[in-house]
Amino acid sequence: MAVKTSLRRLLFWFAILSFPTCCCKPRPAVIAITHVAVIDGTGRLPRPNSAVLIEGGKIASVGLDSSLRVPDGAQVINATGKFLIPGLADMHVHLTGAGEPYGSRQFILPLLVANGVTTVRDMGGKVELLKQLREEIDGGKHLGPQIFFTGPYLDGDPPGYQPAIVVKTPAEARSAVDQLAREHVDFIKTQSRLERDPYFAIAEESRKKGIRFVGHVPDRVSVLEASRAGQASIEHLTGVLLGCSSKEDELRREEFDPGPANATPQQSLARFRAWQRKLLDSYAPEQATTLFRTFAANGTWQVPTFPIIVHFGFLTPRTDLSGDSRMAYVPQNERPLWRQGVKERMEFRTEPDFALREEVVKRYLELTGKMQSMGVRIMAGTDTAAANVFPGSSLHEDLAFLVQAGLTPMQALQAATKNPAEFLGRQQMQGTIEPGKRADLILLDANPLDDIRNTQRIRVVVLQGKLLDRNALDAMINRVAQLAAK
């Protein structure tokens, strides 16, 4: 999204203090969750009266209560009337921002875990900080989700965000990919200001190195070209609406027309409003169908990130979360920065601007539903921790937006469980409730297939076999609020 670099650096939550290592009791040899309805994430209907055994951080067995033997000495959780789902994955977060001393351990990690987020894909940060954080979590020093990451953005000059590697030529682009591959990042991330030749060089070099590239579709590249070039995932639906326009080339030329040098902010906004109106009015259903078939055929995944789209990118007074109760988890000294970001998104805008923003969001939701129906793969994500996007809880909002877009509750749930596991190449290790997989689980008080918002009704989180009951989760959340108030 178009957020100023200086502001974006400040939107991430940083501090020096460390969050306590763990708020859970010593792990018993076996944990048994009994009398539970299992929603395993495979697409099957809930299996009532089931039991799940957890041992050594993995799911040991899944079966009916009547047929599954619980070993002596196991910690037994009677989950009568409750529902068990896989742990959730947020496939677009930023844990360390621009690389300053970071407070991920103190603020972001506990909120993710307390909301059942057990896997994240970091989409822009310094490699050394992300590696350190991942090692601390994997080594048990801190409690947090497993982390996959891209490292710094590859962008044009000047870059839109930090940390970035500026690449202006194909040679620089190939060199940047080689560098990041040597640093063992999980993906390469492209940004909006890349020129065409460096972008396609990134695609080619990534193929040679056997590493997938993901991110924004650059402004000067069509989304159809990005799919054909092999971009593995597209974030924030960048370029998708333009790719569905019968006037795509004309609109792209107009997008790069700077306009009058002496234009007032109001005149510039009026010009942009006319551009957006033309974009919406030139939507071509047949062109969209062709584009989405290409996505499905090429395996071009989509991560819409509706929380950042609705609550910041296309912000209106009705979708502003500045007064949300979750602001209690934002550090006091960061709250003015969030308010400043909101102010800049609202400044000089009038009701017609906000109405148009709502129309764009509605079209994005419609397109997401159509992509799902045509076999395009969808994953959940938030863009945590930008303004108005809250670690952990915003992922549950994204699931609700996906249902609003036309996905079934099961499909939305899979967008944060089974689908990310497949995208990460870890479908044999996580993403569904099956024997041998990571014991990342959430015990819910109500059925999310009846109402996707029930994913928020968390009773227990199991993080790789570590059991966190409601008291432990509340203690984590309360600790964040206490620190944020200082």
Image (cartoon, rainbow, N blue to C red):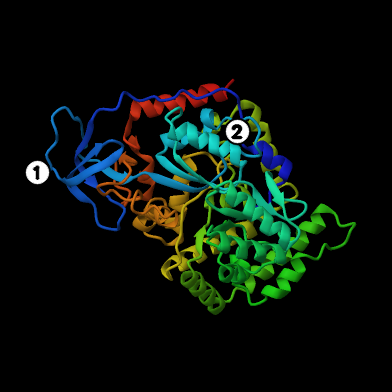
Report the number of discs.
2
Between residue 436 and residue 394, name the one nearer to us.
436
Is 264 left, or right, of 80 in this rendering? Answer: right
**Quarter occupied by the C terminus:** top right
In the picture, the disc for residue 135 is none
Mark 1 or 2, nearer chain start: 2
Residue, far right: 262
Residue at position x 43%, y 71% from top?
A: 374
- Image quadrant where residue 353 sits: bottom right
- Image quadrant where residue 162 sits: top right
Residue type pointed to by label 2: Trp
Q: Is residue 301 above or below residue 468?
A: below
Q: Position of residue 69 (x, y in %)?
A: 11, 39
Residue at position x 73%, y 41% from top?
A: 6
Q: Is residue 328 above or below residue 266?
A: above
Q: Disc 1 on helix, strand or loop?
A: loop
Residue, far left: 66
How dense is the environment of label 2, judged by Cα within 10 Å: few (below 14), some, or many (20 and up)? many
Q: Is residue 478 above or below residue 403?
A: above
Q: Disc 2 on helix, strand or loop?
A: loop
| Distance Cα–Cα, label 1 vs label 2 | 48 Å
Residue to which mark 2 is pinned = 13
Residue type pointed to by label 1: Ser
Residue at position x 62%, y 39% from top?
A: 97
Q: Position of residue 247 (x, y in %)?
A: 67, 76
Residue to which mark 1 is pinned = 66
